[in-house]
Image (cartoon, helix red, strand yellow):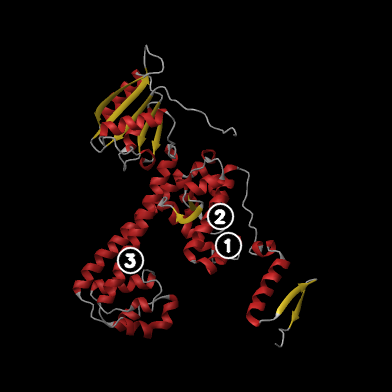
Amino acid sequence: MEEVDEQELLVERVAALDLGKAVLEACVRVPHESRPGRRMQEVRGFATTTSALLAMSDWFRIWGVTRVVMESTSDYWRGAYYLLEAAGFECWLVNAREVKNVPGRAKTDRADAVWLAKVAERGMCRPSLVHPQPIRQLRSLTRYRRSLIRDRTREMQRVEKLLEDAQIKITSVVTDVFGVSGRLILAALIDGQRDPRVLAQLARGKLRPKVAQLQEALTGFFTDHHATILAMMLDNIDRLTAQIATLDTAIAEAVAPFAHQVEQLCEITGVGATAAQELIAEVGVDMSRFPSDAHLVSWAKFCPQTRESAGKTKNKGRAKGSPWLAATLGNVAATAGRTDTFLGARYRRIARRAGKQKAIVATGNALLVIVYHLLSEPTARFHDLGSDHFQTRIDAHRRARNLATQLQALTGQTITIRDGKAVITEPDAA
């Protein structure tokens, strides 16, 4: 028998919430006033309006509640969590999958609230990560910026489809149809100009040598119907671009208190200012919430799941984590994969044998480890290990033996490595 680093936990005065959109059920469990070892509980229903939540807060305070536990039900938990947090209560947000009611019990809102209170008072659940308010505000800004960028990209794709519908092949000649030359041509089409020769002469800069190709590509059947739709699409693109620029300014102000952390992260290969802002918004800057870098990687779901049954370990892949963090890590990994650095070498060596998707996950795993150590130590700086890191770690003799084994399988010769030299023995004539 060995001693384990665990203690029996019992929260004497606990409250649990089963949340809905319009109403919630709250259960309070406290010690019995006259019978030691016994518990008392009361369940009440409240609306989710601010006044009702304040009344519930007063009720908790009367009973001396020290911890309030609630499930992460959609976005309905936010109002109750933020209000109770501001009122001074210790709030825990738990994953509904980990505190499900056991089979055989009634499945009602009141029963769920009581069950959650029983689980919480015995310490049989763990809280999810909820960032402080400055990080939450930064995260809402960065996520909305990414959403607007995706909307703008969709609108640009609609423009390309509309031009194809009108047999305008400008996208086959112009790399960026929304650049200076492209916008001049699109504006002329909207204004009613249909002559391909006149439209091609609007080309600027590097497109001037392609006037003949542009003239051929602009020969189609663009009509006033297409012009009406195209004008709306370009207005939407300009509007979204202006909103993204406004968000960039707001994000720069929100991330100003974390300027040092942004500077640290920008030193990582493939991480720019935008990626650094998004990493801080999703992960935060307080790494004490994670006992180790492995916990951060596991929280982000950038590692395989552990599944063992009957003595056999099964490959389950990685679990579903935050899509916003995954998108940022994926972009950084893809960018780093094209560089002559440690992260680039890691991406390429895994992509060759396991595919690009697993290479992105593995590179994101390494990136999170780097982020953890940089944010844990304010004075830490990123140092690239170099693209030859993996090669220098491989034992030359072991690699020579592996290559000799492969050659032996292909040629049938017996190849032995002696003193760093290959000794070849021809196969027996028989």
Which amino acid does the dot numbered 1 rest on? Answer: Arg
In the drawing, what numbered circle is on residue 156? 3
- Position above or below: 148 against 81: below
Q: Which residue is mark 2?
A: 366
Q: Do the residues under discs 2 and 1 have CB atoms within 8 angstroms?
A: yes
Nearer-N-terminus badge (3/2): 3
Identified at 37% across, 73% down, the residue is 181
Question: Where in the figure is residue 194, as x and y percent of width and height?
Answer: 25, 79
In the drawing, what numbered circle is on residue 346? 1
Which amino acid does the dot numbered 3 rest on? Answer: Met
- Say which quarter of the image contains residue 161: bottom left
Mark 2 Cα-neighbour bin, 10 Å: few <14, some 14–19, many ≥20: some
Quadrant including the C terminus: bottom right
Mark 1 Cα-neighbour bin, 10 Å: few <14, some 14–19, many ≥20: many
Question: Where in the figure is residue 367, as x and y percent of width and height?
Answer: 54, 54
- Position above or below: 408 against 288: below
